[in-house]
Image (cartoon, helix red, strand yellow):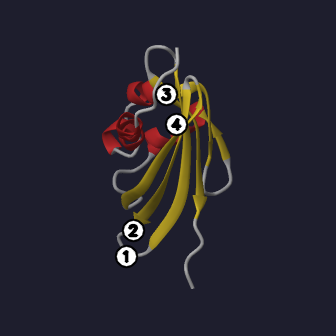
Amino acid sequence: MTLLPDLVEIRSLEQALHRPEIRRSRIELEGLLAEGFLEIGASGRAYDREAIITLLLEEEDDSSGELQTTNYALRPISKNAVLLTYEATRVYRDGSTRSTLRSSIWTHDGTKWQMLFHQGTVRAQAC
């Protein structure tokens, strides 16, 4: 069975991971992040599922500023996986910003969608 990708559903799941109440809940994070999850952060470091869950649970409230996201696109990559790409800009309290290009692979296990891979790449600042 081939699943038709739904941008609204996948974007909603992705954005859930941006919300503090989700980032502070091990149960929610384990439900959204697949076994075998891997993240390559904007820093270039690789994190497995448990490392990311631990980091998110230890994250301080509102410490990283407001996140604005745009230009979501969804592409099927197999019969049960999709690639979500988008742009994110973090606006810090001091007014500075950092823009990243983000990509996530979401897989469907027959019951639900879970994120298998995520990468953030810092976007060069315009001169």
What kind of element bears circle 3? strand
* Amino acid type at mark 4: Thr
Q: Nearer the viewer, residue 1 or 9?
A: 1
Q: Are marks 2 and 1 in contact (CB under 8 Å)?
A: yes
The span from disc 2 to disc 4 (Cα, nearest Å) is 23 Å
Q: Is residue 113 above or below residue 39?
A: above
Instruction: Give the residue at mark 4.
Output: 54
| Contact (Cβ within 8 Å) of mark 2 with mark 4 | no
N-terminal label among 1 and 3: 1
Residue extending farthest bottom = 127
Q: Is residue 11 above or below residue 115?
A: below
Q: Position of residue 119 (x, y in %)?
A: 60, 48
Pointers 3 and 2 in contact (CB under 8 A)?
no
Task: Report the disc number at residue 95.
Answer: 1
- Asked which quadrant contains residue 79, the reply is top right
Q: Earlier in the sequence, mark 3 or mark 2?
A: 2
How many angstroms separate mark 2 from mark 1 (CA)?
A: 5 Å
Q: Is residue 81 left or right of residue 68?
A: right
The span from disc 4 to disc 1 (Cα, nearest Å) is 28 Å
- From what the image shows, is residue 8 above or below residue 100? above
Question: Residue beneath label 2, please?
Answer: 92
Task: Give the foreground label among 4 and 3.
Answer: 3
Q: Answer few, some or many: residues within 10 Å of disc 2's Cα (few below 14, many 20 plus, some between 14 and 19).
A: some
Disc 4 is placed on an element classified as helix
Q: Amino acid at mark 3?
A: Gln
Q: Residue at x 38, y 58 (%)?
A: 67
Residue 114 bears which disc, if any?
3
Pointer 4 and pointer 1: residues touching (CB < 8 Å)?
no
Residue drawn 39% across and 50% down?
60
Q: Amino acid at mark 1?
A: Gly
Q: Nearer the viewer, mark 2 or mark 4?
A: 2
